[in-house]
Image: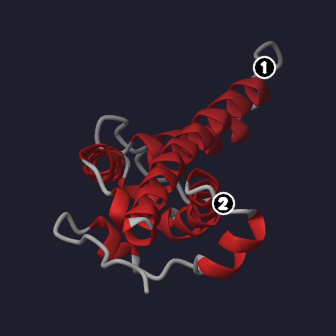
C-alpha cells in the first residue's frame, strides 16, 4: 500500500474515514482493539452513505409525486425537493469522495422511492409497478438542478 498524506476531515470527512480505516487495519498493537475501532469507523462511513441515500430517496419520491400527482402539487413538496437538493449538495461538498458512490446510491434510492411514492399516492403495488418507471426517468444531473421541475406524467 502506497503511503500518502491522510485526508483532512474538515475538507472530506468520508475520505478521512476511509483513510483512517485503512491505517488502523495496518497497525496491530496487542492491547488496543484496532479492528473494533476500524469497524466503528466503517459504520460511520456507511452512515455518511446512508444519509446521502436517504436525501436522494426523499428527492426522488417527491419528484415522482410531483410528476404523477400533479393535481396535488403543493408547497410542502416544493420545500422537500429544494431541501433534499440542498442537503445532497451539502453532503457532497463536505465529503467530495462520496461522489464516487452517488450513482449507486441514487439507483438504490430511486428503487425505494418508487415504492414509497406509489404507496403515498394510494396506488396498489401492481399499479405503481406498472405505472411508475422502473428506473429514474431523469438523470442525476437533472434532478439536482434547482430549475428542474418534472412535467406531469402522461
15 left or right, relative to 77: right
Residues under numbered marks 2 and 1 in contact, where contact means CB atoms less than 8 Å apart? no
Residue under label 1: 33
Residue under label 2: 115
| Circle 2 residues within 10 Å: few <14, some 14–19, many ≥20 | some
3 left or right, relative to 97: right
Q: Nearer the viewer, residue 154 or 62?
A: 154
Q: Residue furthest front?
A: 71
| Circle 1 residues within 10 Å: few <14, some 14–19, many ≥20 | few
Q: Is residue 85 visible?
A: yes
38 left or right, relative to 77: right
Mark 2 vs mark 1: which is more N-terminal?
A: 1
Which quadrant does the C terminus fall into?
Answer: bottom left
Q: Residue furthest left?
A: 147
49 left or right, relative to 92: right
Write the residue at 35% across / 67% down: 70
Write the residue at 62% across / 43% down: 46
For the residues labelled 2 and 1, the Cα–Cα distance comes to 41 Å
Q: Is residue 141 above or below residue 77?
A: below
Which element is circle 1 on?
loop
Amino acid at each position: 500500500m502506497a503511503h500518502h498524506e491522510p485526508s483532512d476531515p474538515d475538507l472530506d470527512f468520508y475520505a478521512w474515514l476511509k483513510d483512517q480505516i485503512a491505517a488502523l487495519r495496518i497497525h496491530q498493537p496487542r492491547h488496543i482493539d484496532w479492528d473494533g475501532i476500524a469497524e466503528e469507523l466503517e459504520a460511520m462511513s456507511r452512515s455518511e452513505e446512508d444519509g446521502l441515500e436517504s436525501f436522494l430517496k426523499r428527492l426522488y419520491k417527491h419528484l415522482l409525486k410531483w410528476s404523477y400527482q400533479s393535481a396535488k402539487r403543493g408547497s410542502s413538496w416544493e420545500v422537500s425537493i429544494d431541501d433534499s437538493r440542498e442537503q445532497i449538495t451539502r453532503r457532497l461538498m463536505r465529503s467530495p469522495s462520496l461522489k464516487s458512490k452517488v450513482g449507486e446510491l441514487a439507483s438504490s434510492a430511486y428503487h425505494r422511492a418508487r415504492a414509497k411514492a406509489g404507496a403515498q399516492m394510494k396506488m396498489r403495488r401492481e399499479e405503481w409497478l406498472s405505472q411508475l418507471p422502473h428506473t429514474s426517468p431523469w438523470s442525476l444531473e437533472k434532478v439536482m438542478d434547482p430549475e428542474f421541475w418534472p412535467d406531469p406524467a402522461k
